[in-house]
Amino acid sequence: MANIVYIATSLDGYIARKDGNIDWLMEIPNPDKSDYGFSTFMKRIDGIIMGRKTFDLVVDFGSWPYSKPVFVLSSTMTRIPENLNAKVQIMKGGVKEIIESLYNKGFKNLYIDGGKTIQSFLKEDLIDELIITRVPIILGSGIPLFDEMDLEIGFEHVQTEVFNNALVKSRYTKKK
């Protein structure tokens, strides 16, 4: 069982602009039309947990990008778009209870996405693996991947790959 973060950040550690905009990610040159290993990663997971703001951002992409079940953490959201009823479920409650519920339903490897959601999982020491791609841009401000915590979590470097002489994707697993 693993809770895995797969995310891109600016060199200064931001996952989005202050207003949540990720336009800077769309400007990355991709001459080979690579997904940079994302489809291989998706084969490893059973479901996706994301926060409300991330869900709203993904819905605006146009076509739904996920074939795996998506669980949206929200205390205020009451319904999802009708076309996603079979693909998305709203979850309320604490992250520990939500994880336990999903594990009991057979979900074992979960993709954790969204700034506040990732931070909530880290604060409860519920992240087992981090896959972080550094994008060569300094945003100067924005939504940080990491926030202050009262907890120190050790990770071990597993692998680093460089794509297009620009993106640096590193994988870390939590120390046992």
Image (tube, rainbow, N blue to C red):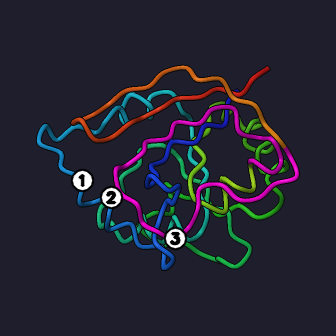
The residue singled out by tag 3 in the image is: 142
Q: In the picture, residue 127 is in which quadrant?
A: top right
Left or right: 33 as drawn, with respect to 58: left
Residues at marks 2 and 3, CA–CA distance in whole angstroms: 13 Å
User: In the image, residue 73 lies at what x, y percent?
Assistant: 67, 62
| Rendering coords of residue 172 (x, y %) | 59, 28
> Between disc 3 and disc 1, whose residue precedes?
1
Please name the amino acid that badge 2 sits on: Leu
Judging by the rendered image, the residue that carries numbered circle 1 is 28
Give the residue type at disc 1: Ile
Give the labeled residue for mark 2. 25
**97 falls in the magenta region:** no
At label 1, counting other C-alpha atoms closer than 10 Å, the crowd grade (few under 14, some 14-19, many 20 or more) is some
Residue at 44% x, 25% y: name it.
160
What secondary structure is found at the residue carrying circle 1? loop
The span shown in magenta is: 122-151
Residue at horizontal 66%, vertical 37%?
A: 3
The picture places residue 133, in percent across and down from the top left corner, at 43, 42
Query: Quarter of the image holding residue 39?
Result: top left
| The N terminus: image quadrant | top right
Viewport quadrant of the C terminus: top right
Residue at 49% in and 47% down:
7
Do the residues bearing badges 1 and 2 touch, measured as CB atoms within 8 Å?
yes
- Disc 3 marks a residue whose amino acid type is Gly
| Dominant secondary structure (helix, strand or loop) of the stretch shown in magenta | loop
Compare marks 2 and 3 and give the one earlier in the sequence: 2
Note whether 174 is above or below 149 in the view shown.
Answer: above
Residue 158's x, y, as percent? 55, 20
For residue 35, above or below residue 121: above
Secondary structure under the numbered disc 2 in the rendered image = helix
How far apart marks 3 and 1 lie (CA) works out to 18 Å
Label 3, secondary structure: give it.
loop
